[in-house]
Image (tube, rainbow, N blue to C red):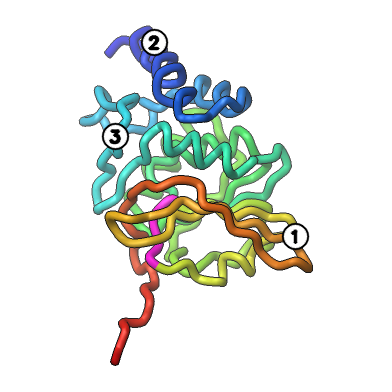
């Protein structure tokens, strides 16, 4: 696909997939319009770079659909000076969106091959306000806490409290919680002395994080 076709596909994605799904935030739309999604897609799926599907990254992992990425960004309310934790680097595309809008991103990936590829993708785009970490973040990553924003890009049957404990006052946590086929995207906000507020965003479905904790089985 020629470069001009990618630019057109990106424009159509914003106008036909993202705007209609209740994403009017101009800063988000401009960021998505600027970053070439095709630069983060595995070569064998380049023709699907702007399709509204989860793209296979291998190892049982996927790239979220453009509309889900945009809705999560909008709910996150990314600020220019945010210190951000991302659990699940994947292709590095969502990392790039967060880094373009925020201050610094600490992104944790458990699969070494995906981490390496994501690093190469980010370097090629000149995005350098990202620290890539290899490790298991399914129960949190307190190394650089507290964070202004935490985004978990895989699903969790059970959301560990350790994520909330890593938030700075006023911090936000985006998580997709539940089991297939019923999963909820949620926004959790640290309100300081008043505790945490939790908001339902929308239903979606993503593969669970590797080693994601599960509720204890019910026993009679």
**What distance separates the C-alpha of mark 3 from that of mark 2?**
18 Å
Earlier in the chain: of badge 1 and badge 2, it is 2
**What distance separates the C-alpha of mark 1 from that of mark 2?**
41 Å
Expressed as whole percent of the image width and height from the top left, the position of residue 175 reads 49, 55
Residue found at the far top of this picture: 4
Whether the magenta-drawn stretch holds residue 156 is answered as yes
Q: Nearer the viewer, residue 43 or 179?
A: 179
Position of 203 with respect to 169 (left or right) is: left
Residue 53 marker? 3
Position of 87 with respect to 53 (left or right) is: right
Residue 169 marker? 1
Q: Check the picture and name the quadrant holding the N terminus.
A: top left
Q: Which residues are magenta?
A: 153-157
Name the secondary structure under disc 1.
Answer: strand
Residue 80 marker? none
Earlier in the chain: of badge 1 and badge 3, it is 3
Q: Main secondary structure of the magenta part?
A: strand
Disc 3 crowd, CA 10 A, few/some/many (<14, 14-19, 20+): some
Earlier in the chain: of badge 3 and badge 2, it is 2
The residue depicted at 66 percent of the width and 64 percent of the height is 196
Expressed as whole percent of the image width and height from the top left, the position of residue 24 reads 57, 25
Position of 97 with respect to 184 (left or right) is: right
Whether 89 is drawn above or below 191: the answer is above
Look at mark 2 in the image and give the residue it sits on.
8
Q: Nearer the viewer, residue 112 or 154?
A: 154
The residue depicted at 25 percent of the width and 53 percent of the height is 59
Q: Nearer the viewer, residue 219 or 107?
A: 219
The residue depicted at 61 percent of the width and 41 percent of the height is 129
């Amino acid at each position: 696909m020629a470069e001009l076709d990618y630019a057109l596909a990106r424009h159509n994605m914003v106008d036909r997939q993202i705007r209609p799904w209740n994403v009017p935030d101009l800063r988000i739309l401009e960021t998505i319009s600027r970053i070439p999604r095709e630069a983060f897609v595995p070569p064998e799926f380049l023709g699907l770079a702007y399709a509204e599907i989860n793209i296979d990254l291998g190892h049982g992992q996927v790239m979220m659909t453009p509309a889900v990425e945009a809705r999560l960004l909008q709910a996150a309310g990314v600020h220019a000076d945010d210190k951000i934790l991302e659990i699940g680097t994947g292709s590095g595309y969502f990392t790039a969106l967060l880094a373009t809008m925020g201050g610094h991103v600490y992104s944790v990936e458990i699969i070494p091959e995906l981490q390496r590829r994501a690093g190469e993708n980010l370097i090629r785009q000149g995005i350098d306000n990202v620290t890539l970490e290899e490790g298991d973040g399914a129960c949190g990553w307190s190394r650089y806490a507290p964070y202004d924003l935490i985004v978990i890009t895989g699903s969790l049957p059970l959301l560990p409290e350790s994520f909330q404990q890593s938030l700075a006052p006023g911090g936000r946590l985006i998580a997709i919680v539940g089991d297939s086929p019923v999963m909820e995207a949620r926004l959790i906000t640290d309100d300081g002395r008043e505790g945490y507020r939790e908001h339902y965003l929308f239903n979606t479905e993503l593969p669970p994080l590797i080693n994601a904790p599960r509720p204890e089985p019910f026993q009679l």
